[in-house]
Amino acid sequence: MKKIHPRQFMILTVLYTIGTSLLIIPSHSAAVVKQDAWLASIGMSFINLLYIVIYILLMHRFPGLNLVQIAEKLLGKWLGNVLAWLYITFFLLLAALLLNYIGQFIHTSILTSTPVWFIYATFALVVVIGIKYGLEAYARSAELFFPIILIFLSLIMLMLVFEVDVSKLLPIAEHSLSSLFLSGLKMSAFQEHICLLMLVHLVDNKNKQTAARALFTGSALGLAVLFAITLLTLLILGSYNTGHALYSVYVLVKKVSIGDFFQRIEILMIAIWFLTVFVKICITTHASLIGMAQSLKMKSCKPLVFPVGLLIAVYSMFVMPNTAAFFEFVNVGWFPYGLLLMFVFPLCFLIIDFVKQLFSSSNDSGASEPNKRPYS
Amino acid sequence: MIDTISIIVVTLLIAVTTLPQVLKAKQWKDLTMAVAILLFASASGICYINHIILFDPVSIVRLIFEPIGRSITAALQS
């Protein structure tokens, strides 16, 4: 099995973190906490980093194992499999939702006359081809895209700096701490880093460069980009426009105009978004395929790639009727679901492992063999 | 009608490109799973085209998690 370099894993993590959140986060948070959305974005980053710390602890406790294998090892075959299928369905639903979201965006903003099913089918085909070639192939393509994405993002941010109006952030911290925390908690459910825990066994750890370090660095970088974009959107569009526009970042980038000749660069943002969402859907679908293959003890997940691709494409057509319904769903329904699978279950895994270790060490007290898996 | 036929054609195309290799390798479990997912996806697509929702995962998530989401929101906003 070919493995990827931790650097590639870090790049995948950055792109995964930016993914759909780039368009969702500013509007979603500004709609609730208005001009304090940037504070909620800081809260979101801390909550997400807390999740990452839990994942890293799990990775340290179970080196070389992915989420499904950890669940099976900790909870036994039956309960482990039940949890594995909960995660698999979560990943499949997430992939369908992501495809639906990008399809709706393209259909309403760019290709208004193109049938939406055609957009879903085309994007699903690209994703399926990416997965068919394997993690190594799409990790390399992500590595190639990464500098382009960075250049485009820096260019956009640099050109937007001229439009900044600091007064749009006032009054600062008008909302209560609990409201900011709630907004941060809701937004933290958009960065489903748990999917990356399904790929960690495919990362080739080299001395200090490990999957855990790559996961943390990548997430921190991605979250920093999200914070910067949220802040810029608020500083330029103001909280009202940010909260009321469906795709506020897209509206923001349309405002770039230097000397009346350098304008309409929103295509750069669309390019960034396509590339990051491609990586996000690839990883999410791949995570579900790996989970299926492992829980069913299959030799390879390759025979399932095209059938699952068709399943996701079909479900993306009716999983959400429009973007407004998507926002309403993620606001109330998605975040407790995400919280359960991204935070509560991994935390329970850690606690169960700790208790198990505690019992095994008390049973073996006085035994000469040292603990092979120290908790620290 | 044309939509239903296109889904059947896509399903057949996937079956022709994917299944022979699995069949040749005699990986029965892989074959069963691939056929099951393919048939389910195809049936869901055909039903959707004919305005029937075979299985809607979002409504299940809504049913279970929306009350929890509302109570968390209410607790933190009060």
Image (tube, rainbow, N blue to C red):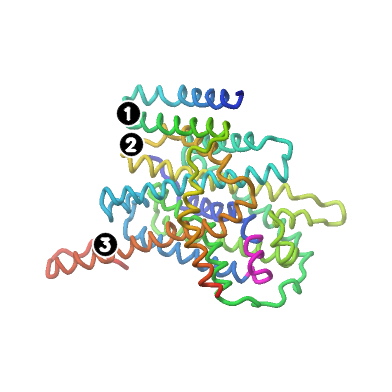
Q: Residue at x 59, y 77 (%)?
A: A176
* Depth check, front residue: B41 or A188: B41
Q: Label 1 vs label 2: CA separation?
A: 8 Å
x and y percentages locating residue A280 in the rendered image: 54, 48
The residue range painted magenta reads: A27-38
Which of the 4 image quarters holds residue A178?
A: bottom right
Q: Is residue A250 magenta?
A: no
Q: Are discs 1 and 3 less than 8 Å apart at CB?
A: no
Q: Are discs 1 and 2 less than 8 Å apart at CB?
A: yes
| Mark 1 residue crowding within 10 angstroms, few (<14) / some (14–19) / many (20+) | some
In this picture, residue B54 sits left or right of residue A238: left
Q: Which disc is residue B27 wearing?
A: 1
- Tell me which secondary structure the magenta stretch mostly adopts: helix
Q: Which disc is residue A76 wearing?
A: none
x and y percentages locating residue A142 in the rendered image: 55, 46
Secondary element under disc 3, as helix, strand or loop, is loop
Secondary element under disc 1, as helix, strand or loop, is loop
In this picture, residue A25 sits left or right of residue A354: right
Amino acid at the residue labelled 2: Met
Which of the 4 image quarters holds residue A117?
A: top right
Amino acid at the residue labelled 1: Gln
Q: Which disc is residue A298 wearing?
A: 2
